[in-house]
Image (cartoon, rainbow, N blue to C red):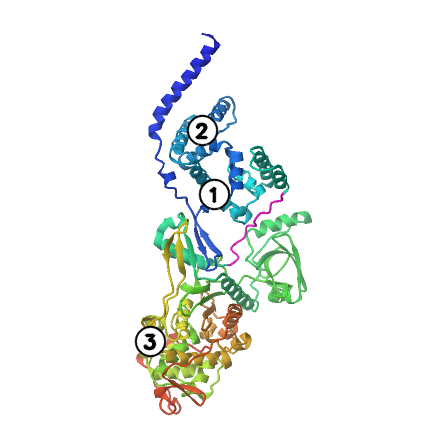
Amino acid sequence: MGIAGGVLALLLGVAICAAIGLAVAYPKIPELSALTDYRPKLPLRVFSSDGVLLGEYGEERRQFVPIGQIPKVMRDAVLAIEDARFYHHGGVDYLGVIRAGLANVGESRRQGASTITMQVARNFYLSTEKTFTRKIYEILLALKIEAQLSKDQILELYMNQIYLGQRAYGFASASEIYFGKPLKNITVGEAAMLAGLPKAPSAYNPIANPARAAKRQQYIIDRMFENGFITEDERKAAHAQVLTYRAPVESPIHAEYVAEMARQLVFAQYGDEAYTRGLNVMVTVDSVQQLAAYHALRRGIMDFERRQQFRGPEAYIDLPADPKAIDARVAEALADHPDNDDLKAAVVLESSPKKVLIALQSGDTITVTGEGLKPVTSGLSSKADPKVQIRPGAIVRAMKTPKGDWTLTQLPEVEGAFVATEPGTGAIRALVGGFDYGKNKFNHVTQAWRQPGSSFKPFIYSGALEKGFTPATIINDGPLFFDAGTTGSQPWEPKNYDGTFDGPIPLRTALAKSKNMVSIRILQSIGPAYAQQWISRFGFDPDKHPPYLTMALGAGSVTPLQMAGAYNVFATGGYRVNPALITKVTDSRGKVLHEETARPLDDTMRVIEPRNAFMMESLLNSVTRIGTAAKAQATLKRPDVYGKTGTTNDSLDAWFCGFQPSLSAVVWIGYDNPRKLGDRETGGGLALPVWIEFMQQALKDVPQAELTPPDGVMNVGGEWYYNEFGPAQGVSGVGLDDKAPPATEDEKKSILDLFKGGT
């Protein structure tokens, strides 16, 4: 038969076996709907109104890019290393398959010869197991794919679907993650580095394994030159380029609470598909204002924290005797105490009452002295409790002051909330739900039901205007005593915050100074039941504000977002507008799935008359000019700001709610489990500075706005009145010569919940 005949017989036998294998396997080849109707698992992304990425949700980071938008240099780099003959074969490189098959029979080390089309087949339909059977299916699928899809369609699928490490799927996402730049701006050297990832994303990760990745990148650059994709000069430049990688950082805008709110809303609409369809969600939040709000609230809380007793280090570790081993021990210990933005975790290396040497996670050592030690003075004493003492091995917190000096401090226990909205549209422009989302995901803006204290008084005053009260009405700021009688409850003797009484004063002055006795007398006069219904106009739930005299001092329950919407009623001239967050949702190709536009203000949204809103704005302006929030106008140096401070009983909650006609904001600070903030802690001292710092940034380029008197009001002697309640026509005085009436039965039952005082 001869050698030639033997070879021919062998080839014939192989062909027959292959034909039988194909005949058996072909009917089992799946349909290609996953390719022809390709829907990659694209993450949900949340963007600010000015296009800044605020959050990303989904297991896979992916950006789908049509083949025409993938730069040539990226396509060439992939073809050079993965399949240089891609546009010239029918889906299978037969010589390569035979070569790999013979190698797999004769060697323990497996080889592959998969074309890009075969890799697409494997990625979509097959396992990664290297067997002869899987290779047969891979070939058949590749042939079927080539018959139904164009070359560009196949390459588009590959370059968007392939896994490239760091949770990145597709080269567009990888370019952003590794280099922090859009794919369209990729260089030859960067393209070669990314093209080396599909073989083994972990092994050739340039961040984790830079030397190994660089070696493969250099090889791919040479392959690009050999295949005519780049010139000699381009090759030399690519070899010489020093690649700069994107540092893995958290979102610098710190809009985690905003992104989570958007995620919840989108998930409620789309379910689990929200995380795989590549939905892009645009929200009303402005990134600049968001960052300003984050820093303002954080600074306000840390300023408060520096006035608190030092509670002691977070932990203690044993430092090694060998100085060379200290750095590794510090790094190991601080892994369990990550930095909290500007609050750095540190290990104390040396300590004395006048100087503390600390080591940061970065390896830097810092010496803290003088003013920087004041917040932890009690821990530096030689007589300090061992659980509080700062000694070598103690894990503490350090942060830079605005002057650039370092100070020791501690993670705060107190929480806070900040929300800013556009009064006329309800658009949320900034929202910070707490001090640190990583530590506490509870959104205090939307979920925290707290007593508003004196920040609630304006809504009682608003109702009083409709009952004939005027800014000039004289009301007695004198003592009140309510005898609980025979009910067995305690009597109530409310006080002003400062413990003093001013006697008969105008209503305007009473609100500016936040006089509790006046608010109680106003509520007595108009009636708690009437007031309970009136406040519902501002969006409050009457059931959360029982019709007792305690309502005058803000004893009900509100959320910061509710308060923002309520104050917006004054800012808009009497309209109630629902808060808005999401403006648009698009799919991965930009198709608009949902869009919200601001609804023009109309009479169906009006809840109080323009003149009531105008009068309240005038009264609230006095608060920020001469009252408990006078620091607002003095610092901002503009008269068009309005608001009210709020401090609840025993200083459990501190508030400031205020607005400029184009922007309103609410600040709350308190403990999750309510406890006293401090004898001298008030809304004006705690919350107001946060509001002012934010407004300094937000109102920087906003022109001043003047109040325009509406119909139905008149000015007499420099004071505003309703036309029908002019001087000597409205309520002229309250409580000037009469004693407080006895408490009703309902009021007696509420005595135990009553306030001592607030501002």
Relative to 403, is 752 on the left or the right? left
Picture quarter with the N terminus: top left
Q: Is residue 542 above or below residue 284?
A: below
What separation in Å lies between label 3 and label 2 (alpha carbons)?
78 Å
What percent of the width, then of the height, locates residue 724? 34, 87
Element under label 3? helix
Amino acid at dot 1: Gly
Where does the magenta region start and end? Answer: 241-253
What percent of the width, then of the height, locates residue 262? 41, 57
Q: Which residue is mark 3?
A: 532
Front residue of this view, candidates 68 and 349: 68
What percent of the width, then of the height, locates residue 144? 38, 31
Magenta residues, dominant SS class: loop
Residues packed near mark 2 inside 10 Å, few (<14), some (14 to 19) or many (20 plus) = many
Q: Is residue 188 magenta?
A: no
Q: Which residue is mark 1?
A: 170
